Image (tube, rainbow, N blue to C red):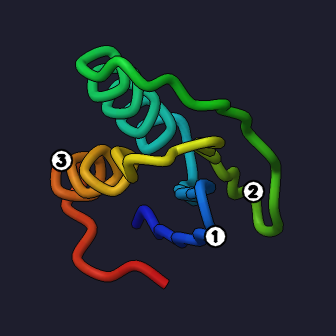
Amino acid sequence: MIDAEYRSEERFAKLSLAYEGAEEKNRVDKCVEKIIAKHSIKPEIYTCCISNGREVLVVEYHDDTDRESGVIFEEMMKELDIKCCD
């Protein structure tokens, strides 16, 4: 199951997507890549390892004065069928 966590401050927004295994990793990577390509604003993206063999892909937008990232994050969550975000 893919879990999501959202954080934001003034002009900054971050979505963290936690997953386990190669299948979920591939699904998250393809989704993020496809949706980011559709938009002009480009994020910083990085991956971290967490406990129990899980990884997290983090998508961060800096200087997002028009708050475009919210729409992008909603698209990602909809495509990944994530119903709840912490």
Residue appearing at x 31%, y 82% in the figure: 84
Residue 38: x and y, percent? Answer: 23, 19
Label 2 sits on what residue type?
Answer: Gly
Between residues 57 and 70, which one lies in front from this camera angle?
70
Disc 2 and disc 3: Cα gap in Å? 24 Å
Disc 1 and disc 2: Cα gap in Å? 30 Å
Label 2: how many Cα within 10 Å (few below 14, some 14–19, many 20+):
few
Residue 36: x and y, percent? Answer: 37, 25
The circle on residue 79 is 3
Query: Of callouts 1 and 2, which one flags the residue occurring earlier in the amino acid sequence?
Result: 1
Q: Look at mark 1 in the image and give the residue it sits on.
A: 9
Between residues 22 and 10, which one lies in front from this camera angle?
10
Label 3 sits on what residue type?
Answer: Glu
Instruction: Tell me how many marks there are.
Output: 3
Q: Are marks 2 and 3 in contact (CB under 8 Å)?
A: no
Question: Farthest residue in the front direction?
Answer: 65
